[in-house]
Structures are given as structure tokens and as C-alpha cells.
Image (cartoon, rainbow, N blue to C red):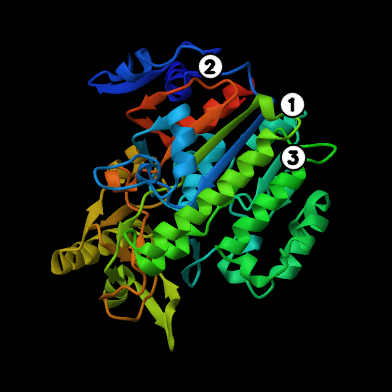
């Protein structure tokens, strides 16, 4: 582990075996470590020894507001808030670029930026445009993951509904959501879920198509499967699990809606049930639990269609009668919510695309061009010629033959670059090997996986 990554891991959790809690400060010479005032006044001892079980739970669009009380506002997740106050919490987590579901979950497994692990956006770029990934795309991170390094040491693993995990090996596996495969969900479940949990999955109603989508029903099934796995004769030592019902509630009602608050409260109930199963399991007294968000969320009012500008410039040919497809393209914008990455067949196509998009940016006043240098510095897709970032409140679409600017059907979004505080996800940890009452002012999403690995005596460094 390099010194920077080692210090970052120490920063996050003040693990008993490491040097304590530090934070990173940028200087002209690069990042340096400084001890946080909160860490200096935190209780010095971690609870118990190193964990025998680590559970990493991601909650769609979980932000610090879910567990940090504000003036005149009660938290929507009181159980999580209580555990956060007793353990470690972060006030702000720097997300990855784009701050979106698939890239974030790949980072949470690897501790790497999208430019390294290869999961660089929400859509897959295709010959006819960009669309949601399918199971056959097997969108998953390259290199070492928490699952692979644990299995290499003989530690059983469970991956339950974890985005960007299809194709990764786990002893207990339940597939992620594929919007393109809802109709064929029962067959996908039968072919991809591991025998170790398939019978329990069927018993819990997992074959229902509502479980194929982000929903409360899906979360209930996943927590039930985790509890069953932990109570089995060969329980996992590493569990990664994604709770998703908050995301459709946010999209439909918006971040400030009663609908969204109710979804977070319901998720809190599922989290309480999961923690109860963990703490009553054979390894319960030696379990560490991490609860993290994948990205933040903002109100959305409009959708931008930058590929329309490329079509007008002759850089792509729309497919007749199909607004979302192109017959062919020489330049295309692959959207991921608030960010878009621009791909081109040749350098001259990239130059023409930049000119067309710069003109559209000036006309709409709703997005900016992101240079290749800024893309590389942020760890975004190195295969893109350059990028786009929408103004907060606008999202990019993938259509090619519709108006360039339309009212949004959804009321929330994510996917912007991580310098926006609104994109900061949440982070809470408690249990074995983790100190009590530590408050981290700022940390990075890429620090989480190396910290989990270090707790288990593992390394995510490439050989």
C-alpha cells in the first residue's frame, strides 16, 4: 500500500491496528496528512479486536443529512443516526466522477477511481448510441475487489444486489437491477443466483418482477437473504448489500418530498433488521458494519439532449422513428445524469463535436465543457475526448432526435462531478475494530474499500 493510500485508510476509521485518525490537506507539493481535532478528542480505543465479519451496506443516495440533525429538522433515519453517533461518521465524502450508481459501487469494491477500475458511467456506449447495461455486458470493475481478495484468503463472501457486480465471483450471489431485463427476471434469477441462496430467494418471493426493480420489496428480500446467509452453516465473512428503495422515491417526489423521507425511514427499518441479524449471528460480537451512500442528489427540472447538437452538426444520423437511437455516429455523448462524456471516431470528429457542443452550451447556458485535462485529474473515463457538466438542476439524456431542452419527467438526479457538495454521499461505521464517537470532517470514497480490507488484514493493491 502506498503511503498516501495507507494514510487515507487510517483517516477513515482510526482502526485500532493503525496509527489513528488523520485527514488529508492539499498543498502545492501534494496531499499531506493532518490529525483532525475531532479525532484527537475521540475515544482512543476501538471496540474489541479485528472483525471476523464485515458488512458493507450501500443505500441509494444516502447523504449525511440522513443521520446528522440540522436546525429545526429531524433525521429520517434515527437508527442509523444513533449508530453513527456511537461509531464513526463523515460530514462529507468526496464522490467519484461521475457521482453515479455504477461508478461509485465499483469504487466501493476496489478503492479505485473509474479511470482505473473501468466502470466509467451509467450507460454502455454502443454502435447505435448509449443505453442501460444488460447482463451480457457484465459491467464490473477490473482488478482486485473486496470480494476477490477475501475469497483468495478463504473468506466466504456475499454480494447481494450490488450494482456493477454481475460476473464477479461470490459464495452467495444475488443479481443487481437491470432495467433492460425486468421481463426476464425470473430466468435471470435462476441462472445467476448461487445455489447457496436460490431456495431462500424463491421462498422470500424474489421471483416477483417488482423485486427486479429498486423497491421496498427488493430491500426486504435482500435483507432476508443476508440474514439467512449469516445463519447458515458456512456464513460469509464479507457481505456487500445494496438497498435501493430510496432512489425511485427521490426520482418521483424529489429530495425534499414526504415520499423520499418515508423511503429513507423504511430503509432505516430494514437496516435495523439487518444489524439485528448481524449482531445475533455467530460472528456478531466481532462484526464491523459500514453504511455508505453511493452519491448525493439534487432537485432536477430540465433535461438536456446534447446529442441533438451533434446530429445538427452532421456527426450522427438519427434512426428514423426511434428518438433514442442513431443509425451511425462519428461523435456521441454518453450521459450519466449531470455529466456527459464525449467520444469520437477521429480527432477531427472530436474537434467538430467540441465546436457544436460549445455553441449549444452558450445557447442554453445550462452546461459547460470539461477539458480532457480536468477529466484525467478527476479520474473520469480516459477514453473520452472531453466531457460535459450540466448546471445543477439539469440532467443529460441520450436521445438524438428530440428538442435539445425539455422539462424533466423525474424530480431528482445525480451524476455530476464531485466538487459539488450536493454530490457528497454519506458514511457511517460501527462495530469491531472501529473507534467510538469519531467525526470525520471530510474523506474520499476511494478510501472506504482499502479501510475495509485493512480491517480484515487484506490488501487491494495490484500485485
Is residue 171 in view?
A: no
Q: Mark 2 or mark 1: which comes first in sequence?
A: 2
Disc on the earlier residue, 3 or 1: 1
Note whether 245 is above or below 88 in the view shown: below
Q: Is residue 227 left or right of residue 101?
A: right
Q: Nearer the viewer, residue 425 or 350?
A: 425
Residue placed under numbered mark 1 in the picture: 153
Q: Are marks 3 and 1 in contact (CB under 8 Å)?
A: no
Residue linked to disc 2: 46
- Distance of mark 3 from mark 1, alpha carbons? 19 Å
* Rendered position, 439 above or below 233: above
Question: Which picture quadrant has residue 443?
Answer: top left
Query: Measuring 31% from the left and 56% from the top, which residue is drawn there?
Result: 298
Image position, residue 25 (x, y; %):
28, 22
Q: Earlier in the sequence, mark 2 or mark 3?
A: 2
Q: Count of labels shown?
A: 3
Which residue shows up at 75% across the image and 69% down it? 187
Look at the numbered disc 2 and give the secondary structure of its residue. Answer: loop
Q: Label 3 belongs to which residue?
A: 230
Position of the C terminus by quadrant = top right
Q: Is residue 131 left or right of residue 275?
A: left
- Coordinates of residue 225 in the picture (x, y in percent): 72, 51
Q: Rounded to the nearest whole Å, what is the CA distance between mark 2 and mark 1?
A: 24 Å
Amino acid at each position: 500500500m502506498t503511503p498516501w493510500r495507507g494514510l487515507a485508510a487510517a483517516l477513515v476509521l482510526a482502526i485500532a491496528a493503525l496509527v489513528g485518525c488523520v485527514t488529508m490537506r492539499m498543498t502545492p507539493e501534494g496531499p499531506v496528512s493532518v490529525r483532525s481535532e475531532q479525532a484527537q478528542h475521540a475515544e482512543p480505543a476501538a471496540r474489541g479486536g479485528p472483525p471476523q465479519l464485515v458488512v458493507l451496506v450501500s443505500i441509494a443516495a444516502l447523504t449525511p443529512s440522513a443521520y446528522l440533525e440540522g436546525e429545526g429538522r429531524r433525521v429520517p433515519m434515527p437508527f442509523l443516526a444513533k449508530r453513527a453517533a456511537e461509531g464513526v461518521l463523515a460530514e462529507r465524502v468526496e464522490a467519484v466522477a461521475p457521482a453515479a450508481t455504477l461508478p461509485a459501487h465499483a469504487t466501493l469494491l476496489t478503492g479505485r477511481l473509474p479511470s482505473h477500475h473501468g466502470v466509467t458511467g451509467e450507460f454502455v456506449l454502443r454502435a447505435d448510441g448509449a443505453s442501460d447495461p444488460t447482463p451480457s455486458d457484465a459491467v464490473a470493475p477490473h482488478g482486485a475487489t473486496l470480494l476477490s481478495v477475501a475469497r483468495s484468503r478463504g473468506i466466504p463472501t456475499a454480494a447481494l444486489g450490488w450494482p456493477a457486480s454481475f460476473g464477479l465471483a461470490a459464495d452467495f450471489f444475488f443479481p443487481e437491477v437491470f432495467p433492460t431485463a425486468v421481463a426476464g427476471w425470473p430466468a435471470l434469477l435462476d441462472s445467476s443466483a448461487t445455489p447457496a441462496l436460490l431456495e431462500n430467494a424463491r421462498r422470500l418471493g424474489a421471483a416477483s418482477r417488482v423485486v427486479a426493480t429498486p423497491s421496498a420489496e427488493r430491500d426486504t428480500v435482500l435483507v432476508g437473504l443476508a440474514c439467512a446467509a449469516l445463519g447458515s452453516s458456512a456464513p460469509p465473512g464479507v457481505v456487500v448489500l445494496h438497498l435501493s428503495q430510496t432512489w425511485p422515491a427521490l426520482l418521483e417526489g424529489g429530495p425534499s418530498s414526504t415520499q423520499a423521507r418515508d423511503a429513507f425511514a423504511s430503509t432505516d427499518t430494514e437496516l435495523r433488521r439487518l444489524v439485528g441479524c448481524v449482531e445475533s449471528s455467530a460472528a456478531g460480537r466481532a462484526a464491523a458494519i459500514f453504511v455508505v451512500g453511493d452519491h448525493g442528489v439534487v432537485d432536477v427540472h430540465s433535461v438536456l439532449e446534447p446529442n441533438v447538437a451533434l446530429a445538427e452538426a452532421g456527426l450522427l444520423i438519427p434512426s428514423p422513428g426511434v428518438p433514442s437511437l442513431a443509425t451511425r455516429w462519428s461523435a456521441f455523448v454518453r450521459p450519466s445524469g449531470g455529466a456527459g462524456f464525449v467520444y469520437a471516431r477521429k480527432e477531427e470528429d472530436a474537434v467538430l463535436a467540441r465546436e457544436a457542443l460549445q455553441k449549444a452550451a452558450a445557447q442554453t447556458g445550462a452546461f459547460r465543457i470539461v477539458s480532457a485535462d480536468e477529466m484525467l485529474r478527476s479520474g473520469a473515463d480516459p477514453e473520452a475526448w472531453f466531457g460535459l457538466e450540466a448546471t445543477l438542476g439539469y440532467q443529460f439524456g441520450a436521445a438524438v432526435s428530440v428538442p435539445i431542452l425539455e422539462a424533466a419527467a423525474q424530480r431528482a438526479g445525480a451524476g455530476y462531478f464531485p466538487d459539488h457538495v450536493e454530490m457528497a454521499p454519506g458514511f457511517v461505521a460501527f462495530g469491531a475494530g472501529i473507534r467510538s464517537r469519531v467525526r470525520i470532517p471530510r474523506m474520499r470514497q476511494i478510501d472506504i474499500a482499502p479501510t475495509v480490507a485493512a480491517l480484515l488484514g487484506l490488501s487491494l493493491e495490484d500485485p
